[in-house]
Amino acid sequence: MNATVISKVLRALLKWWWLIVVAVALSTGAGYLIRSTQPDLYASTVTLQVGQDPRTAVSSTSSIQAGANLINAYAVFVRRPFILQPVIDDLQLGITVNQFNDLIRLNDNPNASLLEVTVIDTDPDRAAVIANRLGEEAVRQSVVSGSASDPDFVDRQIQNLQTQINELDERYNELVAEAANLTSAFEINQNLADQDSTQAALQTLQTLYAQYLNSTSDMQRQVRIFEPASPVYWPVASTGLLDLIISAAIGGVLAVTTIVLITFFDDRFQWSESDLEAVSGVRVLGPLGIVPRNRLPLYADAAPESLEAEALRQLRAKIVLATENGMQPEVITFASHDSGDGKTLTTTNMALTYARSGERTLIIDGDIRKGDIHEFFQLPNVFGLSDVLASSDPIDELLHEAVLKTTIPNLSLMTAGRHSQDPAALLSSPRFEELVNRLRRRFDVVVFDSAPTIAGQDGVFLAEASDGVVIVVNARRTTQSNFKRTVAALSEGRNVHILGLVVNRVRLQVTSKYSSHYYRHTPGIAHTQLNRELLQPAKGPLSFRSNIIVNKRGERLYSLKAASTQLGVRQQTIKDWCKSGTLASERRGFRRWIHEGEIERMLKGLPTATELVAEEEPSTNGLHKVSSKTALGLPENLREQRKAVLGFVRDPDVDDDEG
């Protein structure tokens, strides 16, 4: 990812920061609502010893492996229905074996011969009870499953062996007692033989008894509870702060990922990207703003002080700078890739801007297929460009009918005319070139609104007949690829000069160059308001909100705002003049007022242009001598005052360098 892409992504993140905030807030709220509907869960663990006691067993590789295998076997053993169902029945849990299995977590430790059985429940005390009962059932069932026969049978056999051993022991003792009283050799031998047989039988029974006892002890030592479960009151899952943080992080990551993907694959024009010298080899002339609906369509006339209107005037200057000779082009064509890019609106208001600057301007609707500029001026489309080109009559005779005057001074309109089946044929004819040449002689500026390049080659023929072409792109819909197609289509024409591109529908208020109004003098109050108050100055107690009042002698007094508007200077300048004595003023209440006579005195005392022209007197040596009647005789206080006031009170057509 290069620096350009990274910069693009960062700008997108700054632009869509609110989307990240919304995503984080929504995900946090959703996570809280979901978790709040679920109870807190608690875990309790019982530890089982499987096999030999790790504290007394002798460790070896084989014993450890055997212990691991045994633990794995009991991990499966604990989850079996014959273990779980008795626990469910005894505790009346009211769940199935599968549901019980979902509540069990197992953790084995083969080295220590331990198996941890964890039970999860919504009640910490009940979780401990269930875990302990499950451990007890595992121990009990392991004894049963570890025996070779029925445990009751084993117990009966042990009892029988104990009885037989006791009987044989008593019989042996009786034989020993009888031997002491015998005198016959036969009886003595018979007694000794009975003792040997009784003792042998006794030893056999004792051995069998010991084996039964050992087998029973081994079965009971196979599994036992090593550490019982106890309640744990800290939940393992809750609606705590950690869950909210995780939900917020997920929402933020999803929002950032979405913005990055959209930005990466978004091919549309962005003013932040187009704020360069050129795009795809075409000079960037600047942005045009998003115009409020209440100012459309002729916003340059409806709001001449707006940022959008100022952007048009800036565009007019940049068009001049974009020409090879630095002169105003006589014929300009505005083109775009598709309808809806704002080309027609831009063309119309640019023509209006030229007309307002004093240029005799003609706007021609070159979109013969679907032109509608005439509707902007509330004019019909009866006879226009297509009719002039399709007619065989002399062009000069048709212009008086085809060229319509608008309500805007210096602005005329030639409509598209009637629909034509083959507009390209009309625009590529020699008659069109002749028409353009005749219009050049009659108007200072001719502005063409062309058909979109996606509609055909109509715009190419208009571009060939023009001194330059301006391409209008929409920052919200025109893509880089479509712009390149437009440039390629226009480049197919002969001697087509593309002056540059202008990016339409840009928020001028959030860009670095258009963050505030352009530098211009802002009067203290509007001139229209000043004129109204001059005709009807305020009197009486309501005069505190007025800017023009009348004193008892019938003299009009100007507020500082009114004086700054009348003299065309800043209000602070008026204050400074009052402090220095340049203007005499008086205070009434909390406000300072200036007599109308003081303002008239200042205006009458201004040097005129004739006073600034040096009178030349002939001299005897052939040189000229400057007359003493020059501006050097101005009062010192008026010399500085003149520099601030002259530009606002003189005729607008006078050059700024005069004087």
Image (cartoon, rainbow, N blue to C red):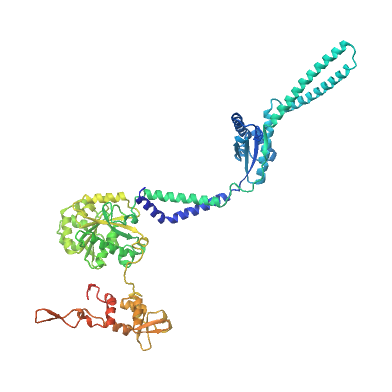
Q: Quadrant of residue 449?
A: bottom left
Q: Is residue 88 visible?
A: no
**Residue 434 percent across, percent down from the top left:** 15, 57
The residue depicted at 69 percent of the width and 29 percent of the height is 218
**Residue 470 percent across, percent down from the top left:** 25, 57
Q: Quick check: 15 above or below 651?
A: above
The residue depicted at 78 percent of the width and 23 percent of the height is 161
State the residue in front, 211 or 492: 211
State the residue in front, 264 or 474: 264
Q: Quick check: 189 above or below 595?
A: above
**Residue 295 percent across, percent down from the top left:** 34, 64
Farthest bottom residue in view: 553
Q: How many marks?
A: 0
The residue depicted at 37 percent of the width and 62 percent of the height is 509
Q: Is residue 617 visible?
A: yes
Quarter in which the C terminus is drawn: bottom left
**Residue 504 percent across, percent down from the top left:** 32, 58
State the residue in front, 116 or 85: 116
- Left or right of 327? Residue 14 is right
Q: Quadrant of residue 608?
A: bottom left
Q: Quick check: 199 above or below 640?
A: above
